[in-house]
Amino acid sequence: MKYLNEYRNLEATNRWLNLIHKTITRNWNIMEVCGGQTHSLVRNGILELLPEKVRMIHGPGCPVCVTPLNLIDKAVELLENNVIVCSFGDMVRVPGSKKSLMQAKANGGDLRILYSPLEAVDVARENPQKQVVFFAVGFETTAPANALSVLQAKEKGLKNYSLLVSHVLVPPAMEAILKDELCKVNAFLGAGHVCTIMGLGEYYPLSAKYKIPIIITGFEPVDLVQGIYMAVNQLEKGIFEVENQYARVVKKEGNLAAKNLINIVFRVGSRQWRGIGEIPDSGYVLQDEFNEFDAELKFGIRHIQVPENKTCIAGEILKGIKKPYECNQFGKNCSPVNPLGAPMVSSEGACAAYYHFTNTV
Ligand code: SF4
């Protein structure tokens, strides 16, 4: 299995680990941006194999975790008002201010768990008497399929399909982290799958402005330890560049067809991030010509705003200021069975990773 076994190979992993141990002379904080990378680091026991001088900080790259409470409340509101709500599975157990989507389904709501927004277009076609909303959560990676679903619905003349858009972008979040006065990040491992779509272009100015190495990295153990070595190597030499560890997948220009689809349907706009607040130009919103597919406009639910849950310190977890076990709810009042916040529910959430794969509970 080319590109799988070779990137889970113990010998290759150890080679890069040895190089890290030989190269490092000082303490460095490296943030892996993506929750998928966090899970791989924790699940494969890589954190314990790194030298003490490397401190991995877990970043905000979990789309479910950063979706603000008010958007879950908006989806619940739709579900309770006879709308068919379609969602990826990760989202349905995340608590809103009063209930999760799953709890609203238990009260009779028509919630469909799907793998693709294109399936939601089919649901709309098969149910012309009902309104169908797809909860469009995600980073740049899910935006092309969501854009395609809108174009398909338009082409089919469907008037009963729309998106509840919660799209966020990685580079503005990285910049927000770097601007935070508590930021301790010395280098980033960039999210490889996001760059598969978007390419590397946005990372050069970020690296130059903040004088910080950014290593675009994959998700397997060899990818991660090689990426960490590349970061340590730059830091020890006092250089800061964008490097592409994930070159077998990521091209400098990204996926032009996917980017084109995104740009037809979406434009960049400000977005709220759970526990972090509003970050300017940090997400996608629908272009004005696609307003008829904007569920917030269509159903008049834009006004629904709720304060974040103060018990859950998701914002500090997502900015890498605290580790999950530093939350006083971790493993006590908050567990995957009874989650208080999204990082404990999502398959990419840092709290879930520590709960399942470490002995920190
Ligand atoms: S352990 Fe639970 S309450 Fe604490 S930050 Fe994680 S999700 Fe929130």
Image (cartoon, grey):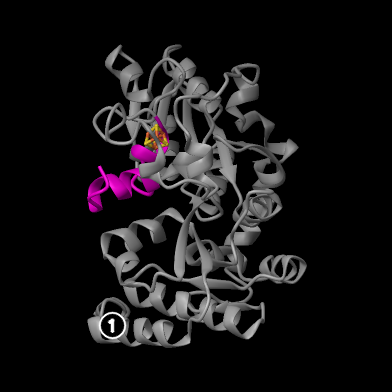
Q: Give above or below for 326 relative to 192.
A: above
Amino acid type, mark 1: Glu
- Residue 60, percent from left and from top: 52, 49
> Can residue 137 be seen in this snapshot?
no
64 over 296 or under it: above or below: below
Q: Nearer the viewer, residue 235 or 194?
A: 235
Query: What residue lies at 57% left-to-right and 61% top-to-bottom?
Result: 258
Looking at the image, can residue 65 be seen?
Answer: yes
**The image quadrant in which ligand 1 is located:** top left
Point out residue 325 in the picture as x, y percentages from the top left corner: 35, 43
Magenta span of residues: 341-361
Along the line of sight, the residue nearer the viewer: 141 or 26: 26
- Please say if 309 is above or below 191: above
Going by the image, does 1 lie left or right of 184?
left
Image quarter in which the C terminus is found: top left
What x and y, as percent, mark residue 114?
A: 34, 40
Q: Is mark 1 within 8 Å of ligand 1?
A: no
Residue in the picture at 31% in, 59% down: 42
**62 sits to left or right of 115:** right
Question: Residue 157: x percent and y percent?
Answer: 57, 34
Along the horizontal axis of the image, is 292 left or right of 218?
Answer: right
- Image quarter in which the N terminus is found: bottom left
Q: Which residue is mark 1?
A: 6
Q: Is residue 269 left or right of residue 254?
A: right
Most foreground residue, 143 or 327: 327
Q: Is residue 79 magenta?
A: no
Q: Nearer the viewer, residue 121 or 44?
A: 44
Q: How many marks?
A: 1
At horizontal 66% and vertical 81% (from top left) the residue drawn is 238
Is label 1 in a helix, a strand or a loop?
Answer: helix
Which of the 4 image quadrants contains residue 17?
A: bottom left
